[in-house]
Image (spheres, rainbow, N blue to C red):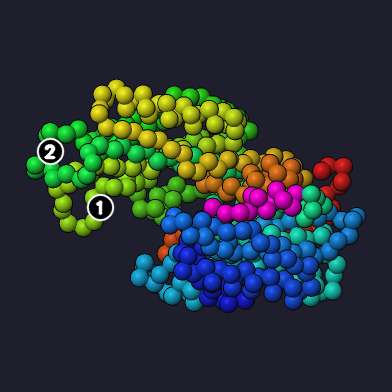
């Protein structure tokens, strides 16, 4: 089954592959129908392309198994679209032909997120194969646009808040991974405010030999203001950002200290000989629970091979601030406004005749759960039962916007329960899911449904 799913090139970023994406959603729906689920393909409208054309968005698959009012109802979220992949990108195998090597199943989407979605489906099938009633009612929400921003999904969740989601008690997301070889439960993600800063000068690109030294260059202005965002040691220089973050508590420090994490392996994996911080707690804290500023690129600058003596007329920097759960959304909004004011004030000091324009293009909120909630206690019990160990309680440094949407719109409790390995290579070449994680992960999901069924109603 995973081989068949990986073979579908459901790349949501490539409009040429949109028929494959529609086929992927129909394949998911058909699988759930054959299992006896109540299945719908929900129309979520159209996507507007940069050239003004519109394209039908892939339908969202919803399904339900069981409708017993005395049982808890869980809703499992997943996605089956993937990042782009080509053999010539550096893959050792065809990315759309699932290939097993040394117990690892290589293929685009294997870990992110097709195998975890299938593992949940297999968990329901296991109960069916044993002629056992599901211990809880199970609902699925499976989308096909997660990798490009989940277009249309927020509106769909809002529209079905009082219908499909009304009876849901808990929401489970398995679109993440372990931190080490130890199983993990994820309880927090950072948000993301993504900015464009555009500096515009001359009407056209200029020859540096003819005009160099006579004009104030947009690129020089842009580099100058970018240099005021973050220090070489990683300290955010924008006033008001770090001040909004709650200090690290003793309980958190202890939790981070107990997490299994090898800093040398981490360095080797990413190919560096020095990290920003030299101890585990500081590194994990700055990866998960402190905001960061990252500069991603400059559009309009000459970046092709070879040399070109050009003064670009207009350049646009792309950078982001990863927000953290402690930052109140209203405060974040204020900080976005402050960011614009800050850059304009820095730019003004340069006394440049060029024009600066700052826009925010993404504003995804952070998410944080209570690790003492019965949902997490059930998770710990299921991991202990399947893996005979206690899990690491971890956060994600990245952003999974759907978690905050579910929280804000439905008000339901959420848990992130990953089964992907720490070395699965999500979004990278040679993405894989180990056979071990796939099989044991399915057992974990089976056990977890049983543990959730035992949560007392009064503790919801």
Residue 356 shown left or right of residue 303 in the figure:
right
Q: Which residue is rendered at x = 40% and y = 41% of the image?
A: 196
Q: Is 206 on the left or on the right of 161, as rendered?
A: left
Visible residue check, residue 334: yes
Q: Position of residue 311 (x, y in %)?
A: 19, 43
The extreme front residue here reads 52
**Number of other residues with Cα within 10 Å of mark 2, as a class: few under 14, some 14 to 19, many 20 or more:** some
* Residue closer to the observer: 426 or 9: 9
11 versus 181 height, above or below: below
Residue furthest left in the image: 210
Q: 179 above or below 241?
A: below
The residue wearing badge 2 is 212
Contact between labelled residues 2 and 1, with CB atoms less than 8 Å apart: no
Considering the numbered disc 2 on the image, is that residue within a helix, a strand or a loop?
A: loop
Image quadrant for the C terminus? Answer: top right
Within the magenta stretch, is there residue 286?
Answer: no
First in sequence: mark 1 vs mark 2:
2
Of the numbered discs in the image, which one, if any, rests on residue 1? none
203, 183: nearer the viewer: 203
Instruction: Locate the N terminus by quadrant.
Output: bottom right
Magenta residues (range) = 147-161
């Amino acid at each position: 089954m995973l081989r068949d799913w990986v073979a579908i090139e459901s790349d949501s970023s490539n409009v040429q592959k949109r028929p494959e994406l529609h086929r992927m959603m129909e394949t998911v729906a058909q699988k759930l129908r054959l299992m006896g689920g109540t299945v719908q393909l929900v129309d979520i409208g159209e996507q507007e392309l940069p050239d003004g054309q519109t394209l039908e968005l892939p339908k969202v698959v919803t399904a339900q198994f069981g409708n017993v009012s005395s049982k808890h109802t869980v809703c499992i979220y997943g996605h089956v679209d993937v990042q782009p992949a080509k053999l010539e990108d550096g893959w050792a195998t065809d990315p759309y032909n699932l290939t097993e090597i040394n117990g690892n199943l290589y293929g685009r989407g294997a870990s992110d997120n097709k195998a975890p979605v299938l593992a949940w489906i297999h968990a329901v099938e296991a109960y069916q194969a044993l002629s056992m009633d599901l211990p809880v009612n199970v609902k699925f929400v499976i989308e096909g646009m997660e990798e490009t921003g989940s277009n249309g999904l927020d509106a769909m969740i809002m529209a079905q808040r009082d219908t499909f989601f009304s009876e849901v008690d808990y929401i489970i997301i398995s679109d993440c991974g372990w931190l080490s070889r130890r199983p993990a439960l994820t309880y927090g993600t950072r948000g993301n405010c993504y900015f464009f800063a555009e500096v515009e000068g001359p009407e056209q690109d200029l020859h540096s030999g003819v005009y160099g030294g006579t004009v104030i260059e947009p690129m020089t202005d842009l580099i100058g203001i970018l240099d005021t965002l973050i220090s070489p040691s990683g300290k955010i220089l924008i006033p008001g950002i770090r001040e909004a973050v709650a200090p690290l508590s003793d309980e958190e420090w202890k939790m981070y200290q107990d997490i299994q994490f090898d800093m040398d392996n981490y360095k080797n994996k990413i190919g560096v000989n020095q990290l920003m911080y030299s101890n585990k707690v500081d590194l994990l804290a700055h990866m998960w629970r402190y905001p960061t500023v990252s500069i991603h690129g400059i559009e309009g600058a000459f970046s092709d091979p070879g040399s070109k003596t050009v003064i670009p007329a207009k350049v646009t920097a792309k950078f982001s601030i990863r927000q953290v759960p402690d930052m109140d959304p209203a405060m974040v909004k204020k900080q976005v406004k402050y960011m614009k004011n800050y850059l304009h004030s820095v730019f003004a000091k340069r006394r440049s005749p060029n024009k600066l324009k700052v826009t925010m293009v993404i504003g995804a909120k952070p998410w944080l759960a209570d690790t003492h909630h019965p949902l997490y206690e059930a998770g710990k019990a299921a991991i202990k039962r399947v893996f005979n160990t206690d899990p690491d309680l971890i956060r994600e440094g990245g952003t999974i916007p759907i978690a905050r949407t579910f929280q804000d719109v439905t008000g339901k409790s959420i848990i992130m329960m990953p089964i992907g390995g720490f070395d699965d290579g999500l979004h990278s070449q040679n993405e894989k899911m180990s056979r071990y994680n796939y099989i044991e992960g399915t057992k974990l999901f089976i056990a977890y449904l049983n543990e959730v069924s035992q949560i007392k109603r009064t503790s919801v």
